[in-house]
Amino acid sequence: MSSQINFKVVIMMAFFSSYSLFSQSSLFAEDLIAQRQWVDSIYSNLSLEEKIGQLFMIDVFTSRSDSELESLESLIKSNHVGGVIFSKGNPYRQAQLTNKIQTENKIPLLVGMDAEWGLAMRLDSTYAFPWNMTLGAIQDTSIVRKVGQQIGKHSKRLGVHINFAPVADINTNPKNPIIGNRSFGETKDIVISHSVALMKGMHEAGILSSAKHFPGHGDTEQDSHKTLPSIGFSEKRIRDIELKPFQALIDEGVSSVMVAHLNIPSLESQKNLPSSLSSKIVSDLLKEELGFNGLIITDALNMKGVSNSSTPGEVDMQAFKAGSDILLISEDIPKAINIIKEAVLKGDITNKRLAASVKKILYAKYKVGLNSFKPIETDQLTEELNSEENDAVYQEAIQNATTVIKNDLGILPINDIDHQTYAYIALGDASGDEFFKTMNQYARVDKIDVTKTNIDLNQFSDYDQIIIGFHKSDANPWADYKFSPFEIELIKSISQDYKTILVNFTRPYSLLQLKNYINIDAIVQAYQNSTIAQQVVGQQLFGAIDFKGKLPVSITSAFPVGTGYKLKSNGRLGYDYPENQGFNAELVSKIDSIAAYTLQEKMTPGMQILIARKGKVIYNKNFGYHTYDKKIKVEDDDVYDLASLTKILTTLPILMTFEESNKIDLKSKLHELLPELAASNKANITVLEMLSHYAKLKAWIPFYKETLEDKSKYYATEFSKKFSVKVAENMYLRTDYQDLIYARIVESDLRDSLEYKYSDLPYYFLKKYIEEQSDSSLDEIAENYFYKPMRLSHLKFYPLNHFEKNKIVPTEFDTEWRNELIHGRVHDQGAAMLGGVGGHAGLFGNATDVAKFMQLYLNGGSYGGKRFFNAETMNKFNTCYYCEKDVRRGVGFDKPQLDEIGPTCGCLSMSSFGHSGFTGTYAWADPEEEIIYVFLSNRIHPVSSNTKLIDEDIRTKIQGFIYESLFKGN
């Protein structure tokens, strides 16, 4: 190995001694010897015109007409142009044109683009990543590196070799008209760390980088596209600040540097000489002093900042003489080639100087694979450039960028959603619909429209907090970002009288207009107004996602650079992408596939499937229909009969609170809870034994069957005091039969042997005890203790009282007892005979609210900033006390199997817990991997004898896919 390294060093030394072209490896390929041989071979066969042609990169707009593009193709070919920089257009047309010009020209062309925030900077139908200013707020630069890598992957997929990024300008002037959001921030440290990270990400994708705009365009109020901006700082200031990011990028191996068109008297004594034409700046400072020997590229030579200084062609030669290698967007390539050729022939430009630039360009071409050009595959091009992976990267960036710069009295995150009222005002000229929609997933938030002429504060009098969103266009980083005078006055007036949260969905500099921030209780800087940004901030306000960002620029002395409160999540469920939570991308397609198979084989008419990890929902989909007639599609807010999930979503958490308040103990005996059992065979059964299903109790008692022989004795077709329990349409059970149910359980025989036997009967006892202790019904207790404070509006008993019938998924067509389709009433016969509320069944819900309750368990008893029970209590109930007796159960919770057969995939931790339901439901949580999995279906429709879902272990197969898709170590 050492001999190979030494050999490479010798080769490199020989290379430097022969050419002295560049002293760093930013343009070297892994196979340096082959690279050098290719470069030498190509160069030795070039004519003088062909060598000079390599210096030019021509701009191409694929949005132009075919005839215009044909003219450009001819210009490229006839002048042996070395590269193209693609501008506005379409990715498909660009790929087609790239393939054409690469195959038609003798030497393949270096393809470049301005893709600072992705290909969308120039192309339609492509992806826009966050602006650099947004990335500058992120404290973990590995995320910035991911963004750079994703931009690089897109560039490579489209046949782009060099991305003219990162921007290394330090935006110390808020009024800068051209840099602004394109800069990472106002300090050299932020710009250094973040530009290096973005560059490294691009390099990892195989794309060349370009540090711009040397020696620093960040502190000017003029646009070099329109004029020659002047930088009036001292040489010391420029060296101490502006040059530092460029030096850092050079040290880290940046591929190229783009030189700006700036007037900098402290660095160039010739009056109004653009920096791009200054040998003192390009050769002396950049090459010699900073030691940069990669590609040096001019900024566009058609920009007024340089084109006004000389004529076309002459400008190109001056830039080349100053030290640039690539002449970008010349105004007259044929003329420029002739002028440079004449200078070479006269000896004004040496062959060595020409060779130095041309060979660097050729080295770059080899490094990006142009020694063996492969056409761009156009099939699925647009789809691959717009994959969900982009959204995952974007969301992670936004989650880490959003910045809380003011948070008086800890108003954020919003916790008390049960007792507070909220209003939302949308300011600006762009939509805030996603922000509004997301907030309403957590609390009721009313949207208040305000007129643009009159401020009426009375319309806010019913609200405790006012959330103001300032929404401006996200089309590009130069878009208007300012408040109107009316909006400024409105914010001032509202914040004087009401608790106010201001969210700024545009660049931070807009906040400079407000002048006074004292009365605004909280200010959130969101940077972007994209759909994802609005969704993320909506979640963050209510505590589902942490706040982590810090200001990359100062907003007066009130909020200096670096301001930012780190606020932890309050435990509410948020939303993310699988890749961000440690899953590979195949998980989604695997689950989609097995769901499709489940429907195809008619194992169930439809289903909801939800997966969450680390407090973030990463998969939440609906499949199929309510019934096999396919009239109503399953939607997010449809509710299913949860069957035995009722045990862990209603009875068990109430017991936990009872245990903490000493109303019950796991060692409590039934006769201590219910004295009337003192003389029964169940008197000494403990809570622990019966909730572990280790108490000799029967599995269930089919009470309804005892009523079938003489229905007239037990049922009436109309409601009355005697027949008050509605079990079906026009079917009312005798009121006193509930007492008979209880008596039958008390009198029932125990099983002969003490062994594990799953039983519903404990929950009849517990329901009775809980209701007696609370002087309230079980459903009311659950609603007031848990569902309402957690805003679980889709966890309900008596669903017909809360939802339209078409939002309730039906279960079985009962031909034995009720003689109707069970729709909106509990399927479980025992719970139905109790009036619809059982300790073991009766709850209806959707996957989202089930998952939220499971998250409460994973959080150790807290959710949304409120503690419902202690983590110690949760651990006590989530313990297998009789595992040595081959009883896998915890206290109320089901647990993973102790052998090969059981309720899970057998691939998750023994600390995990959950439950399944007869109707086809399943909910499971794993504290070790922080995974929640919810599967809801009505597999018993239209008949409960359909056991295909169970026979094929669909629920646990999906669980297996979840764990197979986890990246190791995440």
Image (cartoon, grey):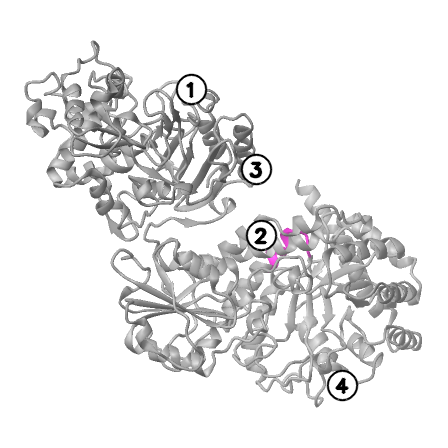
Q: Residue at x 32, y 71 (%)?
A: 460
Going from N to C along the chain, the mark reached first, 3 or 2, is 2
Crowding at mark 2 (Cα within 10 Å: few <14, some 14-19, many 20+): some
Residue indicated by mark 4: 308
Residue indicated by mark 2: 390
Q: Label 2, label 1: how many angstroms apart (C-alpha)?
A: 45 Å
Q: From the image, state whether disc 4 or disc 3 is nearer to you.
A: 3
Residue type (three-letter) at the residue carrying disc 1: Ser
State the image coordinates of residue 372 (x, y, percent, origin top left): 81, 48
Q: Is residue 381 above or below residue 715?
A: below
Q: From the image, state whether disc 3 or disc 2 is nearer to you.
A: 3
Residue 655 shown left or right of residue 196 in the figure: left
Q: Label 4, label 1: how many angstroms apart (C-alpha)?
A: 85 Å
Residue type (three-letter) at the residue carrying disc 3: Ser
State the image coordinates of residue 120 (x, y, percent, origin top left): 65, 61
Return the residue nearer the eye: 824 or 880.
824
Residue 45 shown left or right of residue 94 in the figure: right
Q: Which mark is residue 45?
A: none
Residue type (three-letter) at the residue carrying disc 4: Asn
Q: From the image, state whether disc 2 or disc 1 is nearer to you.
A: 1
Residue indicated by mark 3: 589
Q: From the image, state whether disc 4 or disc 2 is nearer to you.
A: 2
Residue type (three-letter) at the residue carrying disc 2: Asn
Crowding at mark 1 (Cα within 10 Å: few <14, some 14-19, many 20+): few
What is the residue that sits farthest to the bottom in this orientation? Answer: 271
Going from N to C along the chain, the mark reached first, 1 or 3, is 3
205 inside magenta stretch: yes
Going from N to C along the chain, the mark reached first, 4 or 3, is 4
